Amino acid sequence: MQFTPEHEQISDTVRKFVANEINPHSAAWEKAGIFPARELFKKMGDLGLLGIKYPTEFGGMGLDFSYSMVMAEALGDCNVGGVPMAIGVQTDMCTPALARFGTDELRKEFLAPAIAGDMVGCIGVSEVSGGSDVAALKTTAKKDGGDYVINGSKMWITNGMQADWCCLLANTSDGPVHKNKSLIMVPMDAPGITRQKIEKIGMHSSDTAQLFFDNVRVPQRNLIGQEGAGFMFQMLQFQEERLYGAASSLRSLDNLINLTIEYTRQRHTFGQPILNNQVVHFRLAELRTEVECLRALTYRAVESYVAGKDVTKLASMAKLKAGRLSREVTDSCLQYWGGMGFTADNPISQAYRDSRLISIGGGADEIMLGIICKLEGTLPGKQK
């Protein structure tokens, strides 16, 4: 993909923002188990970074998806994973369907404030009984007068403790599971909503919640697009989420390899730098090559997406590779850091904890493999 001066300008702006507004505070946010989303998002909104790909009439920059992915890659300079993940929820996970299919009224009420950084959004899909199996969700939204009455719960909701609104996927009829779901914008101050924080082994700076909906009323005008199209809309949102996950891992992986090269060059054992051992420098060369392969795959998918092509397979491949390569890079690098790599505040152990989620969230590795196999025609009983 060819990068323009505008791509480079956005990347440079994000890198400076990370250096000045995120990394100096990340250790404190990790300890607190939350970061001030409204404060940080407002600063990003003032720079135009929360609406790069969204229409100018709602406060966005009106640029194509590739510019948003350049921002995602630049956020890889964050020294924690929780903050860029939360930013990605705002920019590429809970807003795409709203921006594409929502009415102007809904976009003014929810999208414009999200782009400005005045509101924090979240996406409500996963439930206790199922995450990757979207068709199996149980939350319902039943019509009553001019409202939907929502009952159920959502699990693993990033930004859930601070969110002002939720893009909620719920069953709006008793029809076939792929045609009975709708996306509904739910203000999080509506009566009947309660939140419970979830503790995790990583991504500590990002708040994660379980949400409970008990006879929550929202106007039927809060429906995104047409009723029953929610499953399809969410599958489209997943494509942008998965490409965001792949793009945001690239620079982080490069940075981890850079840190490990420097550490193993300085650290001596048996009279020589650890880096001088062929098993070490060959392995780091292999990992760097794998990162470049992931970068090529990711931006090929991005370029195709911008051209209006179906990138379901490529996005699934990029997401799968990003998760597995993140595990591979962090594990290998931690090994070369030895005991230092096993300390809690080490950047390698931080990434080791945080990046494990990439193979789970937004569709587990096994779901990605299933999608790829289906599109390849290699599932049992399928003909290519």
Image: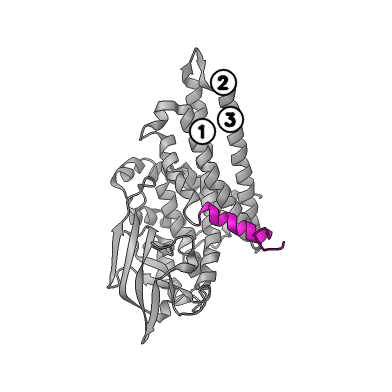
Tell me the SS state at disc 3: helix
Residue indicated by mark 2:
277
Secondary-structure class at tag 2: loop
Residue 48 x/y as whole percent: 46, 57
From which residue to which does the magenta span run?
363-384
**Which residue carries the number 1 mark?**
332
Q: Looking at the image, what colour scheme do you see?
A: one colour
Residue at figure coordinates x 44%, y 39% from the top left: 352
Mark closest to the chain's N terminus, 2 or 1: 2
Q: Report if residue 344 lies within the magenta region.
A: no
User: Looking at the picture, which amino acid does disc 3 mark?
Assistant: Arg
Percent x, y of residue 244:
52, 53
**Residue 10 seen:** no
Identify the residue shown where x is 54% and y is 57%.
367
Q: In the image, what residue occupies the spot 45% across and 63% down?
A: 94
Q: Disc 3 vs disc 1: Cβ atoms closer than 8 Å?
A: yes
**Residue visible at 50% across and 72% down?**
230
User: Which residue bears the numbered disc 3?
Assistant: 283
- SS label for mark 1: helix
Q: Nearer the viewer, residue 77 or 290?
A: 290
Q: CA distance from mark 2 to mark 1?
A: 14 Å
Question: Please, what is the three-letter code of the amino acid marked with disc 1?
Answer: Ser
**Residue 382 belongs to magenta span:** yes
Task: Name the residue furthest bottom.
Answer: 145
